[in-house]
Amino acid sequence: AGKLRFTLHGKTHTLTAFVSADDAVRQRLFVPFRDLTAGMETYQAGRYLDLDRTPTGLYDLDFNRAYQPYCYYDPSYDCPIPPPENRLDVPVRAGERMRGEE
């Protein structure tokens, strides 16, 4: 759907946002990402953000809303893995973490 640029820890980063194939009107953006907390504080494959589309194209990337994928809770689920361009080289210590790490 597009690229989301933001600044974190004084550095500009970009994440690719996607829309679901069954979302014909493209109402929601899906942003899978992985950061340096993966495997230690958060699920090893990464976490997700969901965003409502805005008419302005400006988004509030609130990482406090980042959540673990369903496969963290139930290994019978297959979850999308963040693409290489959505792997951040900084820790994001916000949002949902592994049990015992919150």
Image: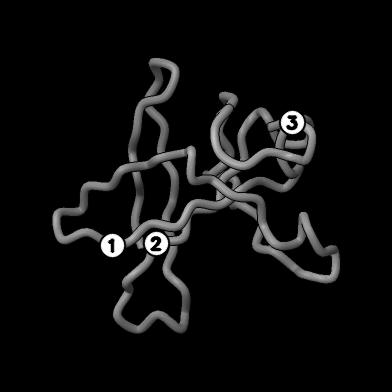
| Mark closest to the chain's N terminus, 1 or 3 | 1
Amino acid type at mark 2:
Leu
**2 and 1 marks in contact (CB < 8 Å):** yes
- Distance from disc 1 to disc 3, alpha carbons, whole Å, reads 31 Å
Q: What residue sits 29% from the left and 80% below the top?
A: 25
Residue placed under numbered mark 2 in the picture:
29
Q: Is residue 58 above or below residue 38?
A: below
| Mark closest to the chain's N terminus, 3 or 2 | 2
Q: Which quarter of the picture shows residue 91? A: top right
Instruction: Return the residue found at the far right.
Output: 75
In the structure shown, which secondary structural element does the residue marked by tag 2 occupy? strand
Residue placed under numbered mark 3 in the picture:
101
Quadrant containing the N terminus is bottom left
Residue placed under numbered mark 1 in the picture:
53
Q: What residue sits 42% from the left and 56% below the top?
A: 17
- Distance from disc 3 to disc 2, alpha carbons, whole Å, reads 27 Å
| Mark closest to the chain's N terminus, 2 or 1 | 2
Q: Is residue 74 above or below residue 88?
A: below
In the structure shown, which secondary structural element does the residue marked by tag 3 occupy? loop
Left or right: where does residue 76 sit relative to residue 20? Answer: right
Q: Is residue 93 above or below residue 97?
A: above
Q: What residue sits 42% from the left and 69% below the top?
A: 19
Q: Is residue 4 above or below residue 26?
A: above
Percent across and percent down for residue 62 are 40, 40
Left or right: where does residue 99 sit relative to residue 87? Answer: right
Tag nearer the camera, 3 or 2 = 3
Amino acid type at mark 3:
Glu
Quadrant containing the C terminus is top right
Amino acid type at mark 1:
Arg
- Distance from disc 2 to disc 1, alpha carbons, whole Å, reads 6 Å
Q: What residue sits 34% from the left and 56% below the top?
A: 2
Instruction: Return the residue found at the far left.
Output: 56
